[in-house]
Image (cartoon, rainbow, N blue to C red):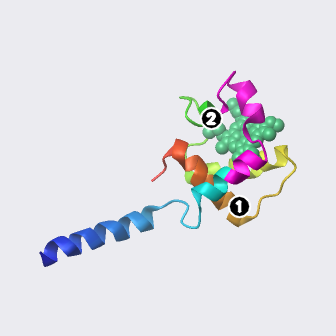
Amino acid sequence: MKLISALILLCTATAALADPFPTGNALAGQKLFVKYDCNQCHNKIMKGDGNKIFTRIDRKRNTPEGLIEQIGMCGGNVDVHFTPQETQYLAAYLNRFYKFK
Ligand code: HEC
């Protein structure tokens, strides 16, 4: 029994450590995403559902760092300079698509 509890503890600790956006918050990120209408261009690029830009086979960003960098670049597209915290929020939201561990 003790061993099982220890194992469960170990697993949750590892999962917490592995979170690529530890200070992120997907819900706050989604609000920003909607507020700045982030998919306005992506919808056009993907000819429909802009979210598909995050899961297409030849997507550009394949690391958490790359995603952070792209959020900074695309923030410029909507004339916003996201704070590091806002960037974490957006990354946590977008990680629903990217699924970085
Ligand atoms: C002015 C148009 C425009 C706006 C607005 C815009 N984007 Fe983008 N976004 C692009 C383009 C262009 C690409 C790159 C497409 C390519 O290279 O194939 C892109 C790509 C991305 C990618 C990378 C997709 C991949 O291939 O992995 C992310 C992440 C992203 N945008 C996030 C955002 C976020 C967050 C916002 C809102 C703050 C936003 N974008 C607003 C034009 C825009």
Q: Which mark is residue 37?
A: none
From which residue to which does the magenta span run?
A: 31-50
Image-based side of 20 in relation to 31, left or right: left
| Disc 1 to disc 2, C-alpha distance | 19 Å
**Residue situated furthest bottom in the rendering:** 2
**Residue 52 at what x, y percent from top left?**
60, 31
Q: Is 29 drawn above or below residue 14 in the view shown?
A: above
Q: Which mark is residue 86?
A: 1
**Residue 85 at what x, y percent from top left?**
69, 66
Please tell me whether mark 2 sits on a helix, a strand or a loop.
helix
Please tell me whether mark 1 sits on a helix, a strand or a loop.
helix
For ligand 1, which image quadrant applies? top right
Image-based side of 89 in relation to 38, left or right: left
**Residue 76 at what x, y percent from top left?**
83, 48
Q: Circle 2 is placed at which residue position? A: 51
Is residue 73 among what the camera can see?
no
Residue at 30 percent of width and 66 percent of height: 11
Residue at 60 percent of width and 56 percent of height: 27
